[in-house]
Image (tube, helix red, strand yellow):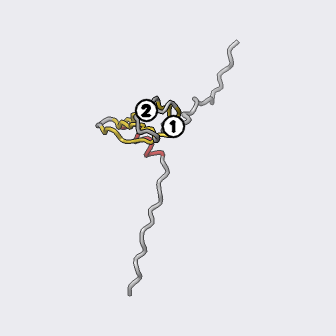
Amino acid sequence: MTQPQHQHEQPPQQQFENFTASSLYCQKCRATTPVRERLLLVLPDKEIFDYLCTECGSSVGQREVTAGEKMMAQATRPRRKRYLPLKPHTR
C-alpha cells in the first residue's frame, strides 16, 4: 500500500550550501592530514580552489565554486554590522 500524500507536505530542504574540506588523504604522506585551501584560478563563471596538504605541501584535491553558488553563499551569509566613527560635536 502507498502512503497518502498530505496537502501541505513540503519538499525536503537543502541541508548545506557547499563543502570545504578540513582534512583529506595525502598519498605522499600516506595518511589523512589537515589541508589548506588555495585559490588556483578565477574564471568568468567559476573559481577553482586547490587543497594542499599542510604536512608536505602536495596537492590533494580541488574544489570548484560557480558564480551562482558564490552569489547564493554571499546572499545567505549574515552581514557584519559596520560601525561608523562618531564625529565630534562642534558648535
Q: Residue at x 47, y 32 (%)?
A: 26
Which residue is the extreme one toward the left? 44
Decide which of 51, 47 is in the foreground and name it.
Answer: 51
Q: Position of residue 8 (x, y in %)?
A: 63, 30
Q: Position of residue 20 (x, y in %)?
A: 48, 38
Decide which of 29, 77 is in the foreground and name it.
Answer: 29
Q: Residue at x 43, y 46 (%)?
A: 74
Which residue is the extreme one toward the right? 1
Residue 33, numbered circle: 1
* Contact check, label 2 and label 1, Cβ < 8 Å: yes
> Where does label 2 land, which residue?
60
Decide which of 35, 66 is in the foreground and name it.
Answer: 35
Q: Position of residue 22 (x, y in %)?
A: 51, 40
- Quadrant occupied by the C terminus: bottom left
Q: Residue at x 38, y 42 (%)?
A: 38
Amino acid type, mark 1:
Thr
- Quadrant occupied by the N terminus: top right
Crowd band around label 1 with a 10 angstrom C-alpha radius: few (<14), some (14–19), many (20+): some
Decide which of 84, 46 is in the foreground and name it.
Answer: 46
Horizontal placement of 44 versus 80: left or right? left
Which of marks 1 and 2 precedes in the sequence?
A: 1
Q: Distance between the Cα atoms at labels 2 and 1?
A: 10 Å
Residue 50, numbered circle: none
Element marked by disc 1: strand
Amino acid type, mark 2:
Val
Element marked by disc 2: strand
Q: How many marks?
A: 2
Q: Position of residue 86 (x, y in %)?
A: 43, 74
Crowd band around label 2 with a 10 angstrom C-alpha radius: few (<14), some (14–19), many (20+): some
Quadrant in which residue 64 is drawn: top left
